[in-house]
């Protein structure tokens, strides 16, 4: 009988602590503990540095950070987004490109598409944004490297429109080998 109760409480706890409301409370609840709410100690817990605010990040904040060229903050904001959208994905990918990290884009896009399936429908916009990045701000080899990385790491996550956008992008960057592979598949 005791094992049955333990099993029931385990299941109840498992389901309760997996809900979004409880996660937000647990992630931000420590900010309201006595001694941690003062402005000078806000965000510091026993010598461990935590995010400076418990609030979730909005798409408007990502846009603002990107417009002011605070690309690292755009990347950090992705983890704290209230709602993940195609526009947010495009902003983060553009920030990675602006930071000169095109080799990280394919894996990031693949993981985002795998964990957030609703973003798959907007991947064509992200690919088009990469291909249309201004040459004055992003070197052409970085754009080509980002497209190749998406091809290598996220090709299986792309829908028809995204494959078409990738095909057009490769054609614009004279990558005949990958255009041929995409046309055959």
Image (cartoon, helix red, strand yellow):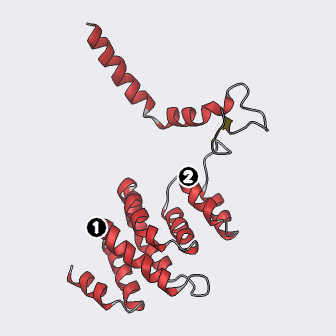
Q: Nearer the viewer, residue 42 or 66?
A: 42
Q: 84 above or below 94? A: above
Residue 137 x, y percent position in the rendering: 61, 82
Residue 142 x, y percent position in the rendering: 49, 80
Q: Which of disc 1 and disc 2 is earlier in sequence?
A: 2
Question: Image quadrant for the C terminus?
Answer: bottom left
> Considering the numbered disc 1 on the image, is that residue within a helix, a strand or a loop?
helix
Q: 182 above or below 89? A: below
Report the residue marked by disc 2: 81
Q: 151 above or below 42? A: below
Separation of residues labelled 2 and 1 (CA atoms): 25 Å
Question: Image quadrant for the N terminus?
Answer: top left
- Say which mark, if any, is on residue 156: 1
Do labels 2 and 1 touch, CB within 8 Å? no
| Residue for point 48% across, 38% down | 20
Instruction: Kindly give the residue lying farthest to the left in the view shown.
Output: 184
Residue 100 x, y percent position in the rendering: 54, 74
Crowd class of label 2 (few under 14; some 14 to 19; many from 20; radius 10 Å): some
């Amino acid at each position: 009988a005791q094992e049955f109760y333990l099993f029931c409480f385990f299941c109840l706890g498992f389901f309760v602590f997996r809900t979004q409301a409880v996660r937000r409370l647990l992630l931000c609840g420590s900010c309201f503990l006595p001694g941690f709410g003062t402005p000078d100690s806000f965000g510091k817990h026993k010598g461990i540095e935590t995010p400076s605010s418990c609030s979730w990040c909005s798409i408007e904040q990502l846009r603002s950070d990107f417009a002011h060229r605070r690309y690292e903050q755009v990347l950090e904001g992705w983890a704290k987004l209230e709602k993940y959208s195609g526009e947010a994905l495009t902003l983060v990918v553009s920030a990675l490109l602006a930071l000169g990290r095109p080799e990280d884009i394919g894996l990031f896009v693949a993981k985002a598409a795998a964990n957030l399936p609703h973003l798959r429908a907007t991947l064509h916009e992200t690919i088009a944004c990469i291909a249309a990045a201004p040459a004055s701000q992003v070197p052409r080899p970085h754009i080509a490297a980002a497209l190749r990385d998406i091809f290598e790491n996220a090709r299986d996550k792309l829908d028809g429109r995204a494959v078409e956008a990738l095909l057009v992008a490769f054609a614009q960057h004279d990558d005949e080998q990958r255009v041929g592979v995409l046309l055959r598949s």
